[in-house]
Amino acid sequence: MKLSQSFIKTFREVGKEETARNAQLLIRAGYIHKEMAGVYDFLPLGLITLNKIQNIIREELNSLGCQEFQMTALQNPEPWVKTKRWSDQVIDVWFKTKLNAGGELGLAPTHEEPITNLMTKFISSYKDLPVYVYQFQTKYRNELRAKSGILRTREFLMKDLYSFSVDETEHQKFYDQVDQAYMRIYTRLGLGDCTYKTYASGGAFAKYSHEYQTVLPVGEDTIYLNQDKTLAINEEVMNDEVLNDLGVKREDLTATTAAEVGNIFTLRYKFSEPINLKFDDQDGIKKTVFMGSYGIGVSRVMGVIAEKFADDKGLVWPENIAPFKYYLIGIGDQGEDFTNILHKEYSSSILLDDRKLRPGEKFADAELMGIPYRVVVSNKTLENNSVEITNRRTSETKILSIEEFKQLLRD
Amino acid sequence: MKLSQSFIKTFREVGKEETARNAQLLIRAGYIHKEMAGVYDFLPLGLITLNKIQNIIREELNSLGCQEFQMTALQNPEPWVKTKRWSDQVIDVWFKTKLNAGGELGLAPTHEEPITNLMTKFISSYKDLPVYVYQFQTKYRNELRAKSGILRTREFLMKDLYSFSVDETEHQKFYDQVDQAYMRIYTRLGLGDCTYKTYASGGAFAKYSHEYQTVLPVGEDTIYLNQDKTLAINEEVMNDEVLNDLGVKREDLTATTAAEVGNIFTLRYKFSEPINLKFDDQDGIKKTVFMGSYGIGVSRVMGVIAEKFADDKGLVWPENIAPFKYYLIGIGDQGEDFTNILHKEYSSSILLDDRKLRPGEKFADAELMGIPYRVVVSNKTLENNSVEITNRRTSETKILSIEEFKQLLRD
């Protein structure tokens, strides 16, 4: 991408009503635009970043044999009435609307009901099981407050995966596979070192569920992490029974603030029972399908990563999800010509700052936008057949030969 | 994809309430699922097809220097009040909803207002222009009737592109480029021979707009096509003045039924004026930005293609957008082993039917699903080092050597 041809701009300041640091930085760096509280557009750099996170999640889920599909936001009340979740008292974040042709519709805050209903058409025998389906889909939640930037919004992109199994044994095997896939995902997103599988409330369906919590000072949760970091418990379920269940002592646990970046639920028969999702087993006996659901808030994760790594100069993206790996600046005629040629050949990894601005302004934007490497090519570096490359995270600067840099671009 | 591992099934029949042939076939072939009238989910094969259409559009728009971004469905009334389009009398397909925190929101049926509003933040000088931005985004339209399958739905995927120019001359240049890009898109989608740029109403903003109309018996529009097919006029604007403007005679035009697959609008100052999107020109004089908008209903186009090419055996996809190019069937142990190996190596172009079904059932599903080539590998064909390949559209069957088929897979 050439910045001279993009409409995006950076800003020194954002409106005072934006109090979350992730959103302040993402707005200032031109990644997102605020429509209203809790509702954000994704501008070109933001959309590329979001897509990179999506692709990492997609690859890991496909490797488990999950199938991608896409459901609608508009919801027919019928299956939700069956599970008693149509009520605004039960789900207090519904957006509801009226159909001109008559009747009330909802905007899905999650998709357990419609997917269970859909599967009644496709699952009838043990031979049809297991089924693992997921989508990247926009969820709507009518949150009363929305003050955490893109960590908690009223319209957001979520990956939701649903599993349908013959019994708990089959379910548990897949549940464990998803757990491992999630840890691979967080590692690839750069959050591997600071994200913990955490015991949380199982809601109405099971004793526990698991959350994935990233240690973060502005996180909304408190988790208790044990000394060797192999176990974490969400404060909301911390009590003697849980400590006993998990065989840990209160004094070995340390409280820390964290942000949820994913969750996995054993749903058991909570949805399949009222919606009547059954199958014939090998003996021809009707049984109820055993379900699980597995979420990752994609835009939320982007916000967590923005918060986690930002410093006083701006965003700092991990390489795997940065919209571009290199922020290229040409100084002087020869420098400009050379960077144009490089950009043409390696456009997918280069953000070329060819705007008519002073180098200092470009350096500041390179930092604010959080591109992993700033690369400067000037008439002077070209005399030595070299480029100057600066690591955004460490600020370390190196001189590379042009050939070495081209090798990096080819990698 | 291996059909044995997918949850999708084909159906002999669909419910009687589904009267549109495109939806009947897409449901029977397992591409979509109907949530309610005018609201459809995209199942794995349907989503792949939709994504292929999207990618063709994306490539052509990127080649014009357009930038992809993504806005939200939730709409703040403010900019819509300024253009007087918040009213249900003016836009009669609004879905509206209430915010728990107070206030009314809408679900965007289109995005002229929010994009114009967003650009007030990024455009202030002639140096910032032109700007070309587009998105693939879900639109919501509260249609009173929804009986055309995925041709007209209440929730659908649309590509919407917006242009911002200094004046009409600059605008017209881009408008013509988009026109040419649209024709390249329809050609790549397999609709090149039967899609015509059509003069249509310019609405409140200009004398004419242009629609792209695909000749289709079940289409909702009537267009008048001249003999050499270089000109088409939508019935809604057919009158003596138009004939005179375009220099054609009524008797040289033939009425034909068609479905709209895209449109391009010169918006002039219709949105930029009330929303106050202005720029300083080279002499420092404030001017209003000149706008255009350009739409393609992505899911609608998929429906048109389904209708257009289907025959009595089912769907017939053009190669460029078929979810897979080859429907592979192995017969007998050796045939099955061989097809498994082929699938492993070329999984992106092969849909492997490895279900425990009779060959006849698989042949019928291959036809219903509309995969361009059915390829059969049996112990017998293997004896001759060959495969049997049948063209879905022409029903022509050929014997290819295994090496020839592998060459096709590599292409």
Image: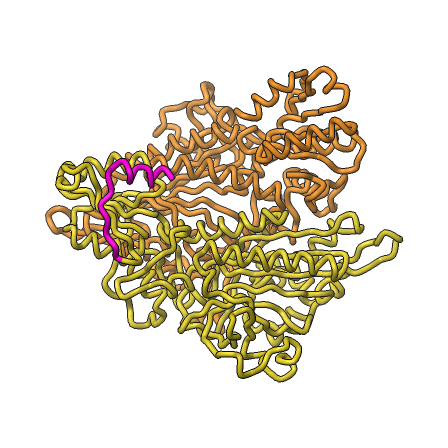
Chain colours: A yellow, B orange
Q: Residue at 16%, 54% (x, y): give it.
A: A360
Quarter holding the N terminus of chain A?
A: top left
Residue that lies at the very extreme toward the left in this rendered image: B283
Q: Is residue A372 left or right of residue B369?
A: left
- Position of residue B163 in the picture relative to residue B317 (left or right): left
- Residue sitting at 52 percent across and 33 percent down? B222
Q: Position of residue A255 (x, y in %)?
A: 48, 79
Which is nearer the eye, A351 or B19?
A351
- Asked if residue B279 lies in the magenta stretch, the reply is no
Please tell me which residue lies in front, A263 or A140. A263
Is A56 left, or right, of A179 in this rendering?
A: left
The x and y percentages for residue B3 are 69, 39
Residue A396 in the magenta stretch? The answer is: yes
**Quadrant in which the C terminus of chain A appears:** top left
Question: Where is residue B350 drawn, in percent x and y?
Answer: 62, 32
Is residue B169 visible in the rendered structure shown here? no
Residue for point 45% across, 50% down: A51
Location of residue A70 in the rendering, given as x and y in whole percent from the top left corner? 58, 50
Residue B306 in the figure: left or right of residue B249: right
Viewer-side residue, B209 vs B160: B160
> Is residue B62 at least partly visible in the picture?
yes
Residue bounds of the magenta highlight: A395-411
A404 in relation to A135, above or below: above
Viewer-proximal residue among A270 and A283 = A283
- Which residue shows up at 45% across the image and 59% down it? A299
Q: Quadrant of residue A94?
A: bottom right
